[in-house]
Each structure stands twice: as C-alpha cells, then as structure tokens.
Amino acid sequence: SVEAVIEYLKPYRINEIVVKNGPESVITQQNNTLQSHTIIPVKTVVDTTSAGDAFNGVYLGARLSGKSIAAAVQLGAKAAGAVIQQP
C-alpha cells in the first residue's frame, strides 16, 4: 500500500517521496505533507512497458526545472499516458 511504502521509507528521512498508485492517483509526501494527485487515465492501454521510466524522467526533469510537485506529477502522468498507448 502507499502507506506501507511511506512508512518503510521514514527512517531514511527522504524529503520528497512520490508513489504511483496505478491508474488511481499519485501520492506525494514532501517533508511531512502528504498529498494525493488525481490523474486522468488513458482510454486505450497498449503496452505499459516504460511507463514508469517515462513518468520518472519527466517528473525529475520538471522538478529540476523548478516546477512544483503538482505540476511535475501532471507532466509525468501525461508522458506515461502517451507511452502506454504505443506498442
């Protein structure tokens, strides 16, 4: 569960945690603030290979470019959505 992942990471004192919760949502925790981000699932899933890589790369690029967590999540989800619609 999302809660179990965040609890597992607690001893490492990670300032920013992002947990992709399938097509449901993305949960983030920055410092001690937990936030749920709604994403719009795509209608046609062809192949989920590399969806996580696409999300992670775009998320990290957005954050390193100064985007907020919420904006980075939306951009990452959009990239992952585009990837999974391709063979």
Image (cartoon, rainbow, N blue to C red):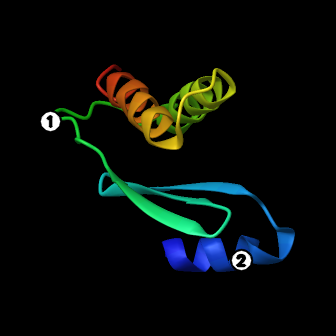
Horizontal side, residue 37 vs residue 50: left or right = left
Amino acid at dot 2: Tyr
Can residue 21 be seen here? The reply is no
Horizontal side, residue 30 vs residue 19: left or right = right
Point out the tag, 1 or 2, that comes first from the N-terminus. 2
For label 2, the SS is: helix
Circle 2: is it few (<14), some (14-19), or many (20+) Cα within 10 Å? few
Check the image and report above or below for 60 versus 2.
above
Circle 1: is it few (<14), some (14-19), or many (20+) Cα within 10 Å? few
Horizontal side, residue 29 vs residue 41: left or right = right
Q: Position of residue 50 (x, y in %)?
A: 52, 31
Q: In which quadrant of the rendered view does residue 46 lie?
A: top left
CB contact under 8 Å: marks 1 and 2: no
Name the residue located 61 percent from the left edge and 27 percent from the top edge.
57
- Which residue is disc 2 drawn over? 8
- Which residue is disc 1 drawn over? 43
For label 1, the SS is: loop
From the image, state whether disc 1 or disc 2 is nearer to you: 2
Name the residue located 59 percent from the left edge and 35 percent from the top edge.
56
Alpha carbons under labels 1 and 2: distance apart? 33 Å
Name the residue located 64 percent from the left edge and 20 percent from the top edge.
65
Amino acid at dot 1: Lys
Name the residue located 51 percent from the left edge and 67 percent from the top edge.
34
Check the image and report above or below for 10 versus 36.
below
Horizontal side, residue 51 vs residue 5: left or right = left
Q: Position of residue 2 (x, y in %)?
A: 51, 71
Quadrant where the C terminus is found in the figure:
top left
